[in-house]
Image (cartoon, rainbow, N blue to C red):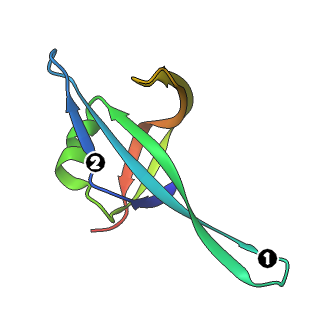
Amino acid sequence: MIGRLGQDPEIINFKDGNKMAKFSLATDDSYKDKDGNKVERANWHNIVVRGGLVNVVENYITKGKEIAVEGKLTNRSYETKEGEKRYVTEIICNELLMLSK
């Protein structure tokens, strides 16, 4: 998918020296409403990057950059401190291409 970063990536450092990057990616979508007017909207996707690509994200990817991401769609759940169950859909990135300077 191709989109723009909504914010600077979050880089998470683990005790074992590994890193992970997380960011949200906006993709544009449009449709025509009942009156035939074009309506544009952004869809937000949660992206997770692991391995060697984290260094690329950390050094070159910032808010507003246009990138292409290829990866695997995953679903997971977690429990909040209040005991509520939350569900998250993420794209685990395995390829990344920078499209804007």
The tag on residue 59 is: none
Looking at the image, is mark 1 or mark 2 earlier in the sequence? 2
* Left or right relative to 42: residue 96: left
- Most extreme residue toward the front is 82
Q: Nearer the viewer, mark 1 or mark 2?
A: 1
Query: Which x, y percent locates residue 24?
Result: 41, 50
Picture quadrant where residue 16 is located? top left
Q: Which mark is residue 9?
A: 2
Towards the viewer: 101 or 4: 4
Residue at 17% in and 49% down: 59
Q: Residue at x 85, y 78 (%)?
A: 34
Choose top left, top right, bottom left or bottom right for residue 87: top right
Query: Does residue 17 sit above or below 47 in this rendering?
Result: above
- Residue pictured at 49% horizontal, 38% vertical: 91
The residue singled out by tag 1 in the image is 33
Residue 71 position in % (x across, y down)? 50, 37
**80 left or right, relative to 88:** left
The kind of residue on which mark 1 rests is Asp
Q: Is residue 74 above or below residue 45?
A: above
Tag 1, which secondary structure?
Answer: loop
Element under disc 2? loop
**Residue 54, x across and y down, in percent:** 25, 37
